[in-house]
Amino acid sequence: MQTCTIFFNEKELILSKAQLREIGYSFDISSEENLGVFISGFLNKEAINPALIFGGSVDLILKKLQKQFKNIEAAGGLVFNAKNEFLLIKRLGKADLPKGKIEKGEDPKTAALREVEEECEFLACE
C-alpha cells in the first residue's frame, strides 16, 4: 500500500511513502521532530485540511501514529432489517453505526450485541 487516508470528522490525514507536493501541511516521519505537535496542529487548526505524513512505509507510519492516541476497544454491528435496510444512529450530529466500549472482562462479540441492543432500545424510546 503506497497511501492511506484517515478521516477525523471532515479532515483528511494522508499517509504516504513519498511526499506529495500538492499538500502543504506535511510531516516527514523520518525526522526527529515531534509527531505529537504536528498532529495537534492538524486537529486544532480549522484551516489545515488535508495534512500529510510521509517518509516511510504506511505500516510504519501507522505504528508511530497509533502511539499518539489512546486505544479504546469498542464493538458494534451493522444491523439489517427484513427490507435489507440498515440501521444508522445520530451521534454528535452525524450518522454512525451502533457501537460502544467493551467492558472489562467482556468479549467483543458479547459487547457488540449488548451495544447494538442498548442503542436500538434507546432509539425505540425516543
Image (tube, rainbow, N blue to C red):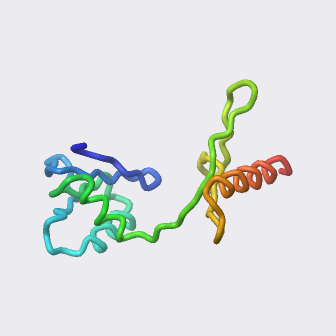
Residue found 61% across the figure and 57% down from its top? 108
| Left or right of 21 on screen, residue 39 | right
Image quarter of residue 63: bottom left
**Image height of 85 relative to 47, above or below:** above
Closer to the camera in the image, 18 or 77: 77
Q: Is residue 87 left or right of residue 59?
A: right
On the rendered image, what quadrant is the N terminus found in?
Answer: top left
- Identified at 25% across, 52% down, the residue is 58
User: Can you give x and y, in whole percent of width and height, for residue 44 in the image?
Assistant: 39, 67
Nearest the eye: 94 or 98? 98
Residue, far top:
83
Q: Which picture quadrant has residue 91?
A: bottom right
Q: Position of residue 45 (x, y in %)?
A: 36, 65
Q: Position of residue 18 (x, y in %)?
A: 14, 50
Position in image of residue 80 (x %, y %): 69, 34
- Work out whether residue 112 or residue 89 is closer to the camera in this orientation and state it: 112
Locate residue 60 relative to residue 32 in the image: left or right: right
Q: Residue at x 15, y 57 (%)?
A: 55
Note whether 37 is above or below 46 in the view shown. Answer: below
Q: Residue at x 27, y 68 (%)?
A: 38
Please name whichever residue, 99 or 96, is drawn nearer the observer in this view of the structure. 99
